[in-house]
């Protein structure tokens, strides 16, 4: 598992416009909240990403940008983004490269034997590309502590 102080794993994923995005390039010289979520259009994931959406002005004041990542296709992520008016980048990890590199595989998601989603997880990277904060839930129904994330951003 990715630990505090380590460099962000190198992985490239597709955005909702089918453009390949390098996490290293997208976070370079930026403080970034990287939120992995199990699945678009699910109740808790919708609530979580809408909370990030509604917090963007505060997060921007803390000089942070947001990237959200799921194993859903870029097409599903695009529909999810548009349906919820999300104002940050969604990335598709359909090959589970990020899930593997961050070691956050959620196996047999929703009781579907063999289906691997991402655990609900939040990482914050500093401008130097290192992990400054991490939170990983074993329970996909548990949301992150948003106040804790904002406090961590104040310290980066």
Image (tube, rainbow, N blue to C red):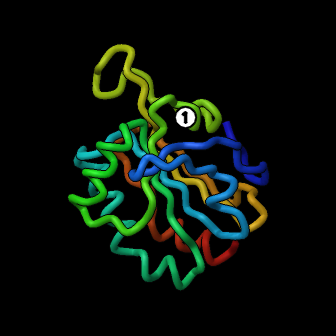
Q: Going by the image, does 62 lie left or right of 115?
A: right
Percent position of residue 20, x then y: 55, 46
The location of residue 107, given as percent across then percent down, is 43, 23
* Residue appearing at x 43%, y 54% in the figure: 90
Element marked by disc 1? helix
Q: Is residue 64 above or below residue 37?
A: below
Horizontal and vertical percent position of residue 49: 35, 59
Q: Would you place residue 56 above or below residue 137 in this image? A: below
Please determine whether, in this image, residue 116 is positioned above or below residue 79: above
| Quadrant in which the N terminus is drawn | top right
The C terminus: image quadrant: bottom right
> How dense is the environment of label 1, judged by Cα within 10 Å: few (below 14), some, or many (20 and up)?
many
Looking at the picture, tell me which residue is in the foreground, 28 or 50.
28
The extreme top residue here reads: 113
* 43 to 110, vertically: above or below: below
Residue under label 1:
99
Residue 33 is left or right of residue 54, and the answer is right
């Amino acid at each position: 598992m990715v630990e505090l102080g380590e460099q962000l794993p190198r992985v490239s994923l597709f955005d909702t416009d089918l453009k390949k995005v390098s996490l290293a390039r997208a976070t370079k010289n930026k403080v970034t909240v990287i939120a992995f979520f199990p699945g678009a259009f699910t109740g808790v994931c919708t609530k979580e990403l809408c909370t990030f959406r509604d917090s963007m002005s505060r997060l921007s004041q803390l000089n942070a940008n947001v990237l959200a990542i799921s194993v859903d296709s870029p097409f599903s992520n695009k529909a999810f983004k548009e349906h919820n008016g999300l104002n940050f980048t969604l990335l598709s990890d359909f090959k589970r490269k990020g899930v593997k590199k961050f070691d956050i595989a959620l196996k047999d998601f929703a009781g579907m034997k063999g289906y691997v989603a991402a655990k609900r997880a939040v990482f914050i990277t500093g401008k130097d590309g290192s992990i400054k904060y991490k939170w990983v839930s074993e329970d996909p129904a548990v949301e992150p502590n948003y106040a804790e994330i904002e406090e961590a951003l104040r310290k980066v």
